Amino acid sequence: MDEDTAYVEAVGSSRMMASLQFLGLPLPQDALGGTLRYKTDHDEVGRATSCGPRTSRLMVKVLAEEAIRLDVPFYNHTTAAKILTCGEGMDRHVAGILTMRPNDRTTTNPFGLALFECSVLVLAAGGPGELYRDSVYPNGCFGSLGLALEAGIELVNL
């Protein structure tokens, strides 16, 4: 595991769990309110927890509800095509994202291209998916790593 990622995950994990529970994620708890844990195939310590087979969906649900409460815009039926960057080397940074929106197709814009300018971009479209032969991700879960790689973003902890 990447050292920086391991550190950030260790420092932030209890806050993250508490935040998700505050937002309504129904993690199982013991009589004293501690989150129940179990061992997975690759974890001998027992650090995992789960709401059952739909944990990821429930996490997305509570996070989406919070985003709606905060008036964060959602762009449904929008497919990212390319992350746009400016600068070189250490000065390279995100400038926007080029997307395709089928509902925006016209005779002058047959692909429904749309440009979103931004200085910060959260790429939250799944993990490595079918990148590996052995994976916990469902078949057909491709993620968005190709976009990141094309933009020159370094990938760690896959």
Image: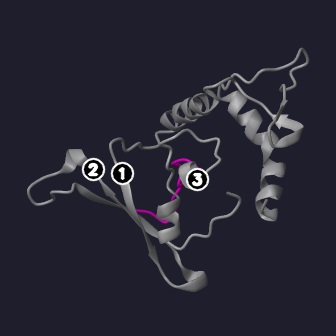
Confirm or deny contact between disc 1 and disc 2 (CB under 8 A).
Answer: yes
* Image quadrant assignment for residue 4: bottom right
What amino acid is labelled 1 in the image? Thr
Residue 151 belongs to the span the image colors magenta: no
**Position in image of residue 138 (x %, y %):** 55, 38
Q: Residues within 10 Å of mark 2 (few under 14, many from 20)?
A: some
Q: CA distance from mark 3 to mark 1?
A: 18 Å
The stretch of residues the image draws in magenta is 117-127
Sequence order check, earlier mark of 2 and 3: 2
Q: Which mark is residue 45?
A: none
Magenta segment's dominant SS is loop
Sequence order check, earlier mark of 1 and 2: 1
Of helix, strand and loop, which one carries label 3? loop
Left or right of 58? Residue 37 is right
Q: Residues within 10 Å of mark 1 (few under 14, many from 20)?
A: some
Q: Is residue 144 above or below residue 82?
A: above
> Total label count?
3
Q: How is the image coloured?
A: one colour
Residue with the mark numbered 3: 128
**Position in image of residue 124 (x %, y %):** 54, 49
What amino acid is labelled 2 in the image? Arg
Q: Quadrant of the C terminus?
A: bottom right
* Image quadrant assignment for residue 56: top right
Give the residue drawn at x 86%, y 21%. 33
Give the residue drawn at x 68%, y 63%. 156
Q: CA distance from mark 1 to mark 2?
A: 7 Å
Sequence order check, earlier mark of 3 and 1: 1
Give the residue drawn at x 69%, y 22%. 26
Of helix, strand and loop, which one carries label 2? loop
Q: Which mark is residue 79?
A: 1
